[in-house]
Amino acid sequence: MSPGTHAQQAFRTEPRNLTVGMGATAVLRCEVLRASGTVQWVKDGLLLGPERSLPGFQRYSMIGNPKRGQYHLQIAKAQLEDDAPYECQAGRSEDSGAIISSTAWVTVQIPPSKPYFEVDMATPWVAGKKYTVSCVAPDAKPVAEITLFKDGVELTGAESFTTSGSKDKLLNTRAEVTYVVTALSSDNGRQLACHANNPAPFRPVETTATMSVYFPPQPPVIVGLEREEVKAGRVLVLECVSHGGNPLATLHWTKNGEVLSTIWEEDIEAQKSSSALRLKITPEDNQAVLCCESVNLVSRSPLSVSRKITVLFEPAEVKLVGELAAIEGQDLILSCYAASSNPPVQIRWWLGYKELNASAVTVEEGDNGGMTTMSNMTHRVSREEDGLELTCEAFNKGTHFSKTQVEKISIYYPPQKIWLDAPPQDVPLHSGTTVRLICFSTGGNPTGTLTWFKNGRVVPSALKQTSFDRGVARELVLVLTASDNMATYRCEAKNEAKKTISAHTKLTVYFPAVSVTITTKQKELRRGQTLTLECESGSSNPKASISWSLGALRSVQPPKTAQFGGVSVQSSLSLNLTSQHHNQRVICQAFSPVLAEGANTFFKLNVFYPPEFSPEQPSQVQVLEDDMATIPLLVSANPEEVSCIWLHRREKLVKEGDLRYHWPDDNSLEIRNVTRKDAGVYTVKCTNDEGVDQTSIMLDVQYAPSVKAEKDPVVVELGGTADLICVADANPVTDGMFSWSFVGEGEVEMGEVTQEDESGLLTIHDVTRAHAGLYQCTADNGIAPAATVGVELVVQFQPELRKGAQWKKVASRGDGTTTAEVVCQAEGIPRVDFSWEKNGVRMDFANPRYEEQTVREGSFHTSTVRVVNVSAALDYAVFSCTARNSLGEDKLDIQLVSTNHPDPPTSFRQVDATQNSVTLEWIPGFNGGLRQRFRIRYREDQLASFLYMDVFPPRATTFTVTGLQPATTYNFSVNALNAMGESGYADNNAVLTITTKVTSGLPAYLTVVFTVVLGVVLLLNSLGCFFGVRWKKRRGQTVISPRRSSQSTASNSNKYESREKINAAAQRTLLIDSGSETDSNVYESYRAVREERRKKREERDDEKEREKGQFGRICGDGEG
């Protein structure tokens, strides 16, 4: 067609419906003939755009040859969202109208998701029940088909229906099948499978589940019990087994309904449960029913198996019943009893080797289903059968076991003879004597039992019966008493034969009175009355004599007959009563001369009397102040209820009046926190129902001293006698209770110490000023604390002015701009007054340029004259100070001068010296009106130069120089410096020579070694020098002695640092001794010092060489 021809657009190929699986690529074809308009795709009414890459739709693109009109739509990785209608459109152009293709549907197939069961597979199923199994295949397109399988076999009868899926266009498929689990165990553990399929996947999607089916076990069986008859004592080992069941069965054993065991084991492989039982058979198990039960979770009821057992057992005991002893000629009647047994036993009797016949046998029901057996036997005995064994035998036919009971029989017959071993009846025995009565008996079976009787009553104190070859004996040991006199002692012999024989004897006993009693007719006894007592002795053999411990015997009555065949005696006593008789015992004694012993009793006297004070009642009581005073009251009375009243200074003491008073139960007086005011006489009056009495006690209150000065201060003139008196208040006042001490500074000679009663006196003769000060008087009477008081001793003396160098000069600039203070200080007592003169003219302090002020401190008095605007012309003068008091006066001239360098110190001396230090002391001179400091100059004794050390602190007047050599002599000096210069050296340039101490020496053997070595070295050195000089002579050389260079000398000298620290308080400096050091402040360098030292050493060396000659020179210096 020519270019000018108009042609209509048309579709060569239109898109068609397309089905594609999810994830695959879909292509919708579209070819346009004569395409002139814009070609684009429409998806479900949405234009996708004209560009072939279709921006905004990543998986969409147009493919094909556009020149051929190919606009195919390609959809990569198809998804559910691509499932929609599509159209291909060509837009209007100038040459053609728009065209739209037919609608093509893209169907995207979606495979189902993993299917799942809608049934509880975690809970096991129960056999026989119906369960509906549902399987769901979710989110498929198109609808999925579901097939159910059991162990690979398809289950039929499933019904399927469809529901909406989780997204639009997706469907869920549900398939249900009703499956009945049979009562067999075959389904247990089988697999259920659900297959889901639609056209989308290559293979079906499936899910599986394992079936768990519960079913009951089989009935149990018992293994190990072959016979029902079992002997007692045997141990049965049984096993209960139950097969099958899911879960496996639980087992338990019971006996007669009581649980024996609940322990079982499971065998998974064999699919069985088993339970072992160990049972020891006892007679109680006879006819018992053993049962084993099995059950699991789905058992409708337990399954069980039972067995009844018959136990064969012997009797638990066989015993003889009846008396095993008999008197000869009588019948022995016994029974033999066999306890329950199965089967019942047969009983036989034996006496020795002879079988006896039973008279009767009885069988009855016994315990545990057994039978008891009783056999009776009667036999007449003779003496010859004594001691034979009687046997009862019980035989069990079931167990083939015999059980016996054996006992010995006894045949009784009486004793044959009895006699006594005792003292003769006609021999008297003393009471208290030990007597032995022995009874003998022979014959009889058993041997006779011996019993002692006294006057027909059994004597329980007889000794234990003993046996001998032919019989028995029993001894009775008697300690004779009055009751044994003429008493009948009988011994009887008796045994089970019930026939008694006896023997007897009597004793004659001497005994003292069996009792003593005292009686009186008077009911109440009082001081001053006469008391009559009656004493009666009890029976005695022979007659006793009566005596009394107090008073005189009044009368004795004739004796009379008494018990035990003895006699009784009576006596009376008269007594005049006093208070001393109260509580005393009056003793009455009945004595037998024959026996040399007696009996006694006493009568305690209860004598009423008014209060009486003991002779030991103290008349004085001492107590320390503040302690508790106890004034004892030693009073006696009867009745003892005594009322006492205490009086002090005629006043009655009552507890309510002073809480410090306290009366204990014994009426003694206690005074708490006693004071010296409580001292004095205390009177006590005591009363009871019989009368009144009184006594007095002195209370002495002792207390620590208090002390005061009789006069303070004590004033005395110099050289006089001082009496220092202190007075003490103390109790007691003891000799030597006063002591004196000086509490001032220093030590003084104490005076004479005396005492007059409560006063202490210190007398000091020839009083000096050193005695002035505080003295302490101490009073100590042995009761703490000691008391002290101070007494001031004031010594009066005329004024004494301080006149040291610092007091005689005052320095100040005379330019009219400064103020000077002229100070005058005096010590004196009494008050010191000052007067001033200037150049001999009394000063007028009305002049405003002069001011005077006096200050007093104790004995020191200071007068200060202030000179304002000091003028050299007017004020450089001599100021005279006069100090006066009533005892005299003193005068000092003080020179006011211009400021200048200080004056030299004085009194320069050594305080101490060690191995490496020296301590020095001096008195400062006038400081020149300025602050001054001090410097120590020192050197070794043979050196020309000095070391200097500045004193620190600057104003100190004692200083220690350290860093010195041991055993070395040093020369020391000191001077003062201020801002204007320095002073001369102390004490007119005096030099203090001090040698430091020696260190501890070397041991003797080391000293000898060093000496020998040094000698050898010197000898070798001399020989070297000698041969060296001879060698030089032979060669014609001349030895010239050159001068030593200052450099070599300096190299051998000790270096000095101007900043070298001696200690923390001083600095050392070297200063040339120029001969005019006192006026020079010029410090020279250490090099000049070293040069001087070098020159001096050279001069000494040259001098030595000249004296020693050629061979005395140092080797190498030349020849002489």
Image (tube, rainbow, N blue to C red):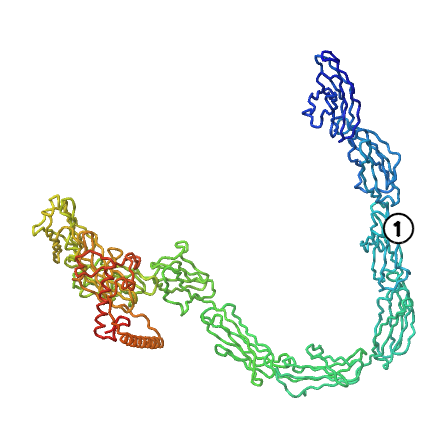
Q: Quadrant of residue 185?
A: top right
In what quadrant of the picture does the C terminus appear? Answer: bottom left
Nearer to us in this view, 148 or 409? 148
Task: Tell me if residue 680 can be seen.
Answer: no
Provide residue 645's location: percent of width, then percent of height: 40, 60
Residue in the foreground of this view, choosing between 163 and 842: 163
Could you tell me which secondary element the residue under label 1 belongs to?
loop
Q: Does any portion of residue 768 appear in the rendered image?
A: yes
Q: Nearer the viewer, residue 444 or 1120?
A: 1120
| Circle 1 residue | 219
Kind of residue at disc 1: Pro
Mark 1 burial class by Cα count in 10 Å: few <14, some 14-19, many 20+ = some
Task: From the viewer's side, name the closer residue of 74 and 1066.
Answer: 74
Q: Is residue 771 above or below residue 6?
A: below
Q: Quadrant of residue 1026?
A: bottom left
- Where is residue 513 shown, x and y percent of the image? 59, 79
Side of 139 relative to 477 (left or right): right
Q: Quadrant of the N terminus?
A: top right
Snapshot quadrant of residue 316: bottom right
For the image shown, how many numbered marks are present on the structure? Answer: 1
Q: Position of residue 974 (x, y in %)?
A: 21, 60
Left or right placement of residue 936 versus residue 259 in this view: left
- Locate residue 165, reporting x and y percent: 77, 29
Q: Quick check: 308 left or right of 1013? A: right
Residue at (20%, 64%) from the top-left corner? 991
Farthest-out residue, left: 841
